[in-house]
Amino acid sequence: MQNLYWKWQFKSAPYWFIAPFVICFIIFVFLPFTYSVYLSFNEWHGQETKTFVGLANYVTLLKSGDFWQSIVNSVLIFVLYVPVMLALALIFAACLSATWMKWTGFFRTVFFIPNITSVVAISFVFLLIFNADQGILNQILMSLGLLDEPIRFLETPWWARVSVAILVIFRWTGYNMILLLGGIQGISKSLYEAAKVDGANGIQSFWHITLPLMRRLLAFCTILSTLGTFSLFTEPFILTGGGPNMATTTPVVLIYNESFKNLNMGYASTISIFFFILMMILSLVQLRLFRERD
Amino acid sequence: MRPKKRVFSTLLSMVLLASIALTGCSGGSGVKKEEAASGGDPGEKTKIVVWIWEDAKNVIDLNMPAFKEKYPNIDVDLHVLAQADVYQNFLIAASSSDKVPDIVNLESHRLSQMIETGGLLDISDKVAPYKEKMNAYKWADAMKDGKAYAMPWDSGPVVMFYRNDLFKQAGLPYEPKDVAEQLKTWEDYKRFAKQLKEKTGVAIMADSKTKTDGTIFQQMLWQHDMWFFGKDGSVQVDNPEFIKIGQYFVDMMNAGYANEVQPWSDAWYSSFQQNKQATIVGASWYDGLLPSLIDPNGAGKWSVAPMPKWSEDDKYSSAIDGGSNLAINKNSKHPEEAWKFIEFMLGNDASQLKMMEGGLFPSLETTYQDPVFQEKVPYFNDQPVRTLYVDAVKNATPITYTKDYPLANELIRNAFAEIFLDKKSVEEVFKKTADQLRQKTGRK
């Protein structure tokens, strides 16, 4: 009897330990998600009755230029920032793990701070920096004689995307740097020593040892950044409000606008479900590529 | 004995875990509901919760001592939220049948949209005595199918605030009387803009090509008795008159008559103190904003004249921008107390006049007889400016924002951005916008 009970306890214990997470997950993720799926088949503007419309919302979505525009915007922002960010992160990581580097702890903290600072606060600061007439960035560029006229950063589509990209680089370089730092430190020192014996300099060993061995980790960072870019919200929302003329409207900003501004809850749910499916396919494809490279 | 103890302790830890999981995550709303329920017993003090934004709370506060004196048994919790949060949180509250808040503050331009959600209480009987006393246009957005869902608070009749010193420098008429006589139409406005720019280099207005908030354009529409939607509900964005007004705005911007700055941005605020533009064609609530937030050192420099008209034969001479309302949550446990609060604040002259001191122009017309409206205002060079607001509100076109206004506004702002960025014609872009609007709203 006692033995049986002990066995039951032994077997069930893990479930009790994961219960808090599972309960929270069901309440806050799974149920809302299921409800969204249900909503996506309805027309609902917040009133008591919902009208079942079948796949009509999905048809609207596929026909609507807005959604595809938001996907294109995300891709453009991705192209603008990911290469720069990963290059910077890798260079910083390589520098921080170099033997001649001092104050490494200090720099690691400095680079990571933007990532844990409130994104709202950072966005507001960048809003001031990017201001066309009084922003410090234009002032500096103009006093250096690089510009004759101020760049209207937040008011033209391309510069608005660049501004969002710069903000994202600022926030996420440190995070990626820490990930890459872990990878670099995992590379055996003996490889570098061997290279040195063979007469390779620092840059050569970075190019021929560090970079190839970091490929897996770089691919991992790219996957994380892909998902991150498509679900960007706070940065464009505060910095540009999704404008001008929807140039920085990401899918999540679009979902926000449709649901809370236009009260098209059903249609907004449709966008999020469709977006979810798209992201899932993208992740699967990326994981597959990642595995093959392995 | 021992197994029993184990069972007990396992059970205990289960309960603890569950309670941590549940309270940790959903504690917020549970507490709120209890609070609301416990206040309902008769004879006891009742607590009503009002969701409101900062500026609105500040003027309500002016009346709170008098309210407490009259209704000692009603406790009012003025819960301040950011304006956008009031709508979002109320949507969530309404769709989950939450009893909190009892009262919610709603701007006119989002009122129809909120009524549409069905979360507001039908207060037709309660507002009936005020039907005649309020600005007639305010009811249009507060009604649906003949029933009233909100009580009007303040109105935003549009006038033209202008810098008399800059006008004088440019050799333009600068006395309010002369300005009113010589600047009657938007064509005159353009003429003034030209002279201002040539003589002083100052722009006449401030707006952004690609990030306009659409206010100036919409005020022009409104005064001309045009709107995104016609009286029959059809989309008017491709109406030739509508396009003409859009063209005027585009011409003003392209001619460089506007200081290019995004409305309500930090740069916009500071541009007034840097003398970058000479007029604000805007609602009466600038009366409160100018001396406090926009140009605190500008006393004596600002004067007020009626807003320019599209055409001299226009039936109406003014427009409306903004204004808000108070409404009761359909699921409120204390609708009677909530109504007492609303009636006290918005339905009587004394409270409304007090709130006007805080910069909100009352929708309650019975107040307009009060001598305070004739008073000279020191900030405006001792001009009795409030008489102009009264004239403006009486001559403003009665237009309904409608529930699709937020969407229409968004689309038209994008349309202007497209016109300026891609150098497209107003007609072409507005026609495209009209089609989008039709497709998204199902209107004709």
Image (spheres, rainbow, N blue to C red):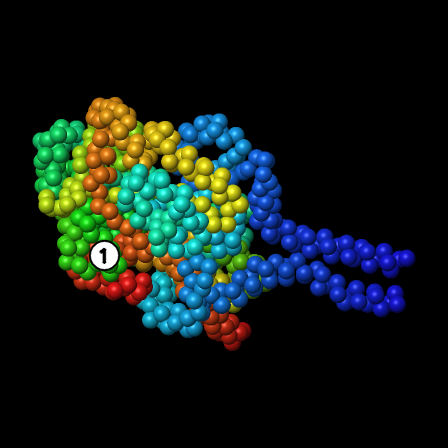
Query: Are there few (<14), some (14-19), or many (20+) residues within 10 Å of tag 1?
Result: some
Chain letter of the residue beneath label 1 in the structure image: B
Q: Tell me the quadrant of the picture where the N terminus of chain A can be found.
A: bottom right
Q: How many marks?
A: 1
Residue denoted by label 1: B230
Q: Residue furthest bottom?
A: A292
Q: Is residue B316 above or below residue A222?
A: above
Q: Tell me the quadrant of the picture where the C terminus of chain A can be found.
A: bottom right
Name the residue located 66 percent from the left edge and 58 percent from the top edge: A20
Check disc 1 and give the amino acid type: Gly
Nearest the eye: A120 or B53: B53
Residue A164, how many percent across, how many down? 37, 54
Q: Is residue B383 above or below residue B249?
A: above
B138 to the left or right of A199: left
Based on the displayed image, in which of its 4 quarters is residue A65 positioned?
bottom left
Q: Is residue A110 visible?
A: no
Q: Is residue B117 visible?
A: yes
A272 to the left or right of B206: right
Residue A103, how many percent across, how many down? 53, 45
B167 to the left or right of B143: left
Nearest the eye: B118 or A223: B118
Name the residue located 41 percent from the left edge and 71 percent from the top edge: A53
Based on the displayed image, in which of its 4 quarters is residue B155 positioned?
top left
Nearest the eye: B65 or A16: B65
Q: Is residue A101 above or below residue B193?
A: below
Name the residue located 59 percent from the left edge and 45 percent from the top edge: B37
Residue B385, how many percent across, how many down? 22, 29
Residue B28, how many percent across, how many down? 58, 47
